[in-house]
Amino acid sequence: VQLQASGGGLVQSGGSLRLSCAASGFTLHDYFIGWFRQAPGKEREAVSCISKWGGRTYYADSVKGRFTISRDVAKNSLSLQMNSLKPEDTAVYYCAADVALKPYGASCSVNDDQYDFWGQGTQVTVSS
């Protein structure tokens, strides 16, 4: 079971990036998937996540209206479209999978300790 995050880079403030999370060894859309980020000197924080049922999503207040999480079932991947980027979005971004059994209709978790598999991270740097 592996996750691989990609799509990071250097972008100017106001620009856009699209991060991808590809899975191997399991079917991504069978699980809850989260995007987290960690900036230097800061704790890792949840950015967005998506439930395995009905596409229920969560966004941190700091990214609401700017970021969009979506699944590509055919490609067994998930993306995070990031628009109107700000310098404070600079961080290493990780995708993670929560494979625990949950009751039908459960929401995805914002707690990183609930996630079982992690990608290697991709650096996003937003210049002012």
Image (cartoon, grey):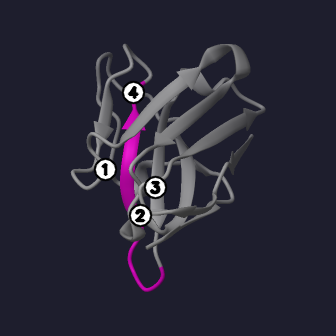
Q: Which of the two discs, 1 and 4, labels the residue nearer the N terminus?
A: 4
Measure how far apart labels 4 and 3 are at the Cα level. 15 Å
Measure how far apart labels 3 and 1 are at the Cα level. 12 Å
**Amino acid type assigned to the residue bearing label 2 in the image:** Asp
Q: Is residue 32 left or right of residue 29?
A: left
Identify residue for label 3.
Answer: 36
Identify residue for label 1.
Answer: 63
Identify residue for label 2.
Answer: 89
SS of the residue at dot 1? loop
Which numbered dot is residue 102?
A: none
SS of the residue at dot 2? helix
Identify residue for label 4.
Answer: 51
Q: Residue at x 32, y 21 (%)?
A: 103
Measure how far apart labels 1 and 2 are at the Cα level. 9 Å
Q: Which of the two discs, 2 and 3, labels the residue nearer the N terminus?
A: 3
Residues packed near mark 2 inside 10 Å, few (<14), some (14 to 19) or many (20 plus): many
Q: Position of residue 72 (x, y in %)?
A: 61, 20
Q: Position of residue 7 (x, y in %)?
A: 67, 49
Residues in magenta, as a range: 40-51
Measure how far apart labels 2 and 3 are at the Cα level. 11 Å
Q: Residue at x 38, y 50 (%)?
A: 84
Residues packed near mark 3 inside 10 Å, few (<14), some (14 to 19) or many (20 plus): many
